[in-house]
Image (cartoon, coloured by chain):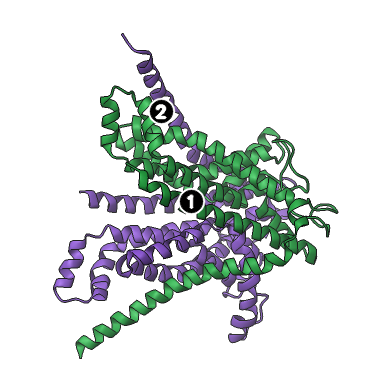
Chain colours: A green, B purple
Amino acid sequence: MNMKKTKIEELFFKTLMRLAAIIIIGTLLLIIYSIFIKGLPAMSWEMITQTPKGGYYLGKEGGILNAIIGSLLLAAGSTFLATIISLPIIIYINVYCRKTLFSNAVRLCFDIMWGIPSIVYGAFGFTFMVFFGMKTSLLAGIIIVSLVILPVIVRIVDEVVRMISSGLYEASYALGATRLQTSMKVILKQSATGILTALLVAFGRAIGDAAAVLFTTGYTDSIPTSLFHAAATLPLAIFFQLSVPIPEVTARAYASALILTIIILLISLLARVLTNKYNKFKV
Amino acid sequence: MLNGRIIKDRLTSKILLIFTILISLIVIIIGVELFYKSQPIIKSNSLQELIFSKDWHPLKGHFGMLSFIAGTAWVTIIAVIIAVPLCLLTAIYLSEYVHKRVLKIINPFIDILAGIPSVIFGVWGIIIIVPFIRFNIAPLFGVSTTGYNVLAGGIILGIMIIPVIISVMVEVFKTIPVELREASLSLGATKWQTIKLVVLKKAKPGIIAAIVLGVSRALGETMAVLMVVGNMVQVPTSVFDSAYPLPTLIANNYGEMLSIPMYDSALMFAALVLFIIVVLFNVLSRIILSRIERKLRA
């Protein structure tokens, strides 16, 4: 009798767990599905090859080329900047610094940085821009967004580098290599896949971020021609145009949402393929 | 005699040390900057008034932020209520029951969910959640609402923090020694009993850390919430009321903040409040998690 009760309890909770997992996966599929359903009818050749016409995102014609290019530039620029900053730090805390206390303090700093909301970065960046009399520009956006994604790169790559066995270091040192040579020729090479994956994740973060670019990159209907011009980004194109009660304008918002979602899906697919493919060749 | 490459190596070491310290200090720089910028408002309106008054009239110089703080609290609490049971069940399922092959299928979904931008959640909320609340949920309770309310914000937020919580929880469950489970199973306990009485008990601090981390993520989430929460300055009294959480306040008003006196300082104060809470929560959960990790290594 008692036996039966425990069996039933087990079955009950197992079903509940399956249900929870299904709800989560189902929600994700529903999100992607509804973005596609709303976005596909709005897609057209003009949408991705033209900038909006008729003034400040209220015109009924044209597409979202400005936002696509703006977003790609912003994400590429900030990923590039964040990589340049993060790699030396990762090398220092793993190869040079043998005091774990210091390394762990640095890790904690980046964990905290990871947790800071992007709106706070945006507000922080804005105070600096006001101080220096800077206007909203692509450059300001790149700098602030690179701060947002910096901890992402540092922490993901750090995890990968930490996994490298000490034997590899010792082999390199035994050959007479300095720490610098070991880092450049062994450690970076060994963690190349991890770095690439981190870059993809960071790129996805950067292209999807709206709160930080709201203050710093601004919004414009034209394609940015220099780093000092304001630039449109996909998240803001969605946000601004969705709230306008003109069907042609909301269509542009849905098309932007679709493109952003596709970019994000492609990135995560690419990251997965990379990890699966190159993990085999690791020492 | 020192070799050229050794000099280079030592020089690099020093440069990297300085560079690492400088970049790590960004967190502190942000805190100091926000603190400095919010000084004027703290001096002219007392802290007490800023936090506990709901009198929000920037033009008259009243900056009581209770409505915004309450809005943040409401959406965060709803998000936690939605996310935690789902996460706990799924995390147990993934780490205790599921075969590795199934794990390989489910994990990518959670990764993708983690990567979906905030705005996309907002769009989805407007397409699906808001109408659903307006036409299906609210009528059940005899309430009429536009659907843009605390509940919509909480649901969206709950879904957004799921990946963070699950991944931390799964890591925590991994740290519980297999021997403990085996001991319990060999005493005749069923798998669920083992999980309930042994694994969950052992994992309690880690589970709390995961939830705290999820909460801190929820507190700062801006765009998705902004799009569905209704943006009305009031202290919500039910889940069907509109609200105006803190991050939303900052995002919506950056444009006019330079034209009204003290307004910019008030917004920086809002950012400071967010910053302090989020940093505290993060440090707290990291301390718990690193303790678990250390215990595991010992």
Q: Nearer the viewer, residue A258 or A101?
A: A258
- Residue B100 versus residue A155 in the image, above or below: below
Relative placement, left or right, of B8 versus A213 is left
Q: Identify the amino acid type marked 1.
A: Ala
Q: Position of residue B150 (x, y in %)?
A: 58, 70
Can the viewer see residue B45? no
Relative placement, left or right, of A172 versus A137 is left
Viewport quadrant of the N terminus of chain A: bottom left
Marks 2 and 1: CB-CB under 8 Å? no
Residue drawn at x 67%, y 53% is: A234
Q: Residue furthest left?
A: B187
Q: Position of residue B260 (x, y in %)?
A: 73, 48
Q: Position of residue A102 (x, y in %)?
A: 34, 35
- Residue A234 versus residue A21 in the image, above or below: above
**Res. B17 mark:** 2
**Res. A271 mark:** 1
> What is the chain identity of the residue bearing mark 2?
B
Relative placement, left or right, of A261 versus B275 is right
Marks 2 and 1 share the same chain: no
> What is the chain identity of the residue bearing mark 1?
A
